[in-house]
Image: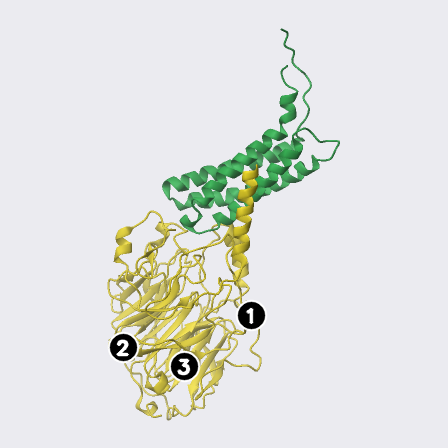
């Protein structure tokens, strides 16, 4: 009996220990510090306390001004800047994962408290600033009755939208403010059963022939069984001509944003890594995605660190796991990615912007901002620089949560905020000349969420 | 030697108490068996079953704990009722810890989940033995 009491006392200590805040080293770059995995009996959760922006706006670097260009959206996630400067916003919330364990019943409502309460938009909204004064006076529904649209890409006159269950195609003509009536054409069905991680990030290859679609895992770490992970945690390459697909890369737990690097045409991704092995594991990361590459999930993380929660083991897969390029920090929830261009000014000319939605399972919250990761010679070089902050106060008050980030070739960064249901535009002061007169004809702009070519009008300081 | 059978059985359990103990014990045993199945097969559904069975066990065991506490009033107290109540409370706390352990994803619950399931079942069984003690005492002489 004494022994039992001892066991009970020991277990109670574990519970208490798990409640203590444990701020740890933040990890950036190619060689993050990785502590030993650990988990107490209770998870460390710190849920955002939603609040209004009021008169406040995000804090942006000197030389930039920020403005809310759309409000009252229905969960804006990703944006696409069209050749004529119009902005498309994908709105919605997906996923149909049932509560599997008692903890899902308890944790679900707790986590939901830190997100917006508005219903899923399931639509695309178009924003237009016809006179180039930075005020987007037109806010109109471009297409509706979609299914949790997320990834967006324009190839010629084809607008591709990645719903949570399929890539669909709209015909797009320059200057359009509304898609033609009728259902869009389905290009390729996507894996959508359960959809624990439902977001389907998408970008188009530089030549516009292929679409790359990120398909997140169906669990944190295989707790829904391996059969649920068929065609999950992968990036698909879809042929735009035929709709045929193949697996381009795997082991990417939740590739939430994809972008093509200007010049090289290389595919990059930000990936959200696994939870519940400590506040500093596992760093979410930014990486170039190698064709045929395997990045570890579920068997390994950050290269060949074995995750012992996955049984049966798979040493071959562990051995094959590629170490990602650049750690962004554990639990920051990177959901947005876009390559910068010289229009953003010399300091931000080469690199990527990363939108960080922010943590929920870390006693010391992280993320809740947009950072810039500088590149040199086409590779990440240096620490991330805060680009847009002020989304969250130290006392937990949270006004916004950044998701998609898109570089507007007129010299601005477009940020979707899915808590405040706002789209922010962070414009470089004096960078952009307004587009003259009518919208220019559509080009073969094929970068999906990114734009390779810099309009000449916008290259000046 | 003459053996006589004592015909009078002291009613150790109120029928509702007995029902709750039986329900809890079945669910606790189910948790243990499902944990064993997961540990042997890695088939994830078993640990989902275990997690839910354990929650069911907690519900029944909590109600049974109320009965056990009521059994401590002097007019109802038997030789084993204090020990029964104490051990049952220990089993319930262990089962609560077991619920937290079962909330871990996939194999992270193991081997702790299995160890706790064995402990909960064992402690619950011993606890019920103490509740039934007066029956033995009044048995064959």
Q: Nearer the viewer, residue A77 or A307?
A: A307
Chain with green colouring: B
* Among numbered discs 2 and 1, the one appearing first in the sequence: 2
Foreground: disc 2 or disc 3: 2
| Frontmost residue, A155 versus A62 | A62
Return the residue nearer the eye: A250 or A186. Answer: A250
Q: Residues within 10 Å of mark 2 (few under 14, many from 20)?
A: some
| Display colour for chain A | yellow
Q: Secondary structure at mark 2?
A: loop
Residue at mark 1: chain: A
Residue A21 visible in rendering: yes
Numbered tag placed on residue A378 in the rendering: 2
Which numbered mark, 3 or 1, is in the foreground of this view? 1
Residue bearing the label numbered 1: A396
* Image disc number at residue B72: none
User: x%, y% of residue A273?
Assistant: 39, 62
- Chain label for disc 2: A
Q: Position of residue A290 (x, y in %)?
A: 25, 66
Q: Is disc 3 placed on a helix, strand or loop?
A: strand
Q: Residue at x 52, y 73 (%)?
A: A392
Cα–Cα span, label 2 and label 1: 37 Å
User: Which residue is identified by label 3?
Assistant: A413
Question: What residue is drawn where x is 24% and y is 72%?
Answer: A209
């Amino acid at each position: 009996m004494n022994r039992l009491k001892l066991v009970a006392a020991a277990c109670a200590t574990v519970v208490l220990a798990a409640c203590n805040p444990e701020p740890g080293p933040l990890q950036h770059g190619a060689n993050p510090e990785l502590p030993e995995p650990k988990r107490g009996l209770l998870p460390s959760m710190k849920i955002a306390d939603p609040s209004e922006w009021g008169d406040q706006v995000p804090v942006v670097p000197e030389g930039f001004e920020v403005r809310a260009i759309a409000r009252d959206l229905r969960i804006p996630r990703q944006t696409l800047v069209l050749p004529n400067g119009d902005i498309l916003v994908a709105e919605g919330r997906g996923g149909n994962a049932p509560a599997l364990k008692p903890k899902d019943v308890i944790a679900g409502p707790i986590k939901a408290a830190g997100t917006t309460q508005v219903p899923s938009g399931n639509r695309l909204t178009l924003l237009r600033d016809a006179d180039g004064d930075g005020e987007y006076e037109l806010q109109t529904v471009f297409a509706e009755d979609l299914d949790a649209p997320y990834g967006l890409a324009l190839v010629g006159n084809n607008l591709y939208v990645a719903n949570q269950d399929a890539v669909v195609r709209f015909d797009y003509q320059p200057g359009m403010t509304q898609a033609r009536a009728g259902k869009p054409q389905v290009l390729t069905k996507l894996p959508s059963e359960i959809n624990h991680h439902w977001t389907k990030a998408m970008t188009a290859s530089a030549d516009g022939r292929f679409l790359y679609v990120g398909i997140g895992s169906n669990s944190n770490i295989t707790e829904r069984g391996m059969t649920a992970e068929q065609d999950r945690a992968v990036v698909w390459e879809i042929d735009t001509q035929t709709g045929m697909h193949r697996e381009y890369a795997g082991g990417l737990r939740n590739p939430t944003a994809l972008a093509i690097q200007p010049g090289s045409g290389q595919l990059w991704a930000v990936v959200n890594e696994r939870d519940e092995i400590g506040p500093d594991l596992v760093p979410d990361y930014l990486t170039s995605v190698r064709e045929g590459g395997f990045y570890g999930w579920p068997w390994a993380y950050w290269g060949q660190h074995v995750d012992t929660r996955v049984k049966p083991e798979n040493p071959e897969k562990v051995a094959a796991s590629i170490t990602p390029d650049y750690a962004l920090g554990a639990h920051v929830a990177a959901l947005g990615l876009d390559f910068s261009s010289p229009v953003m000014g010399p300091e931000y000319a080469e690199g990527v912007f990363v939108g960080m939605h922010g943590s929920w399972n870390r006693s010391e919250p992280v993320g809740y901002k947009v950072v810039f990761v500088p590149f040199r010679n086409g590779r990440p070089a240096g620490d991330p620089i805060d680009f847009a902050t002020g989304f969250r106060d130290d006392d937990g008050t949270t006004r916004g949560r950044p998701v998609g980030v898109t570089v507007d070739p007129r010299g601005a960064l477009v940020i979707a905020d899915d808590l405040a249901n706002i789209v922010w535009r962070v414009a470089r002061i004096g960078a952009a000349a307004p587009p003259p007169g009518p919208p220019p004809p559509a080009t073969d702009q094929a970068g999906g969420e990114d734009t390779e070519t810099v309009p000449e009008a916008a290259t000046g300081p | 030697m003459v053996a006589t059978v004592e015909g009078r059985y002291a009613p150790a359990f109120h029928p509702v108490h007995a029902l709750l103990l039986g329900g809890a014990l079945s669910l606790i045993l189910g948790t243990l068996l499902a944990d064993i199945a997961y540990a042997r097969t890695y088939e994830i559904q078993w640990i989902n079953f275990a997690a839910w069975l354990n929650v069911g066990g907690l519900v029944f065991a909590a109600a049974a704990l109320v009965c056990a506490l009521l059994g401590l009033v002097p007019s109802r107290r038997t030789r084993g009722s204090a020990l029964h109540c104490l051990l049952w409370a220990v089993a319930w706390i262990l089962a609560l810890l077991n619920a937290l352990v079962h909330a871990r994803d996939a194999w992270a619950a193991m081997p702790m989940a299995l160890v706790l399931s064995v402990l909960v079942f064992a402690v619950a069984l011993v606890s019920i033995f103490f509740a039934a003690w007066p029956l033995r005492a009044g048995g064959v002489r």
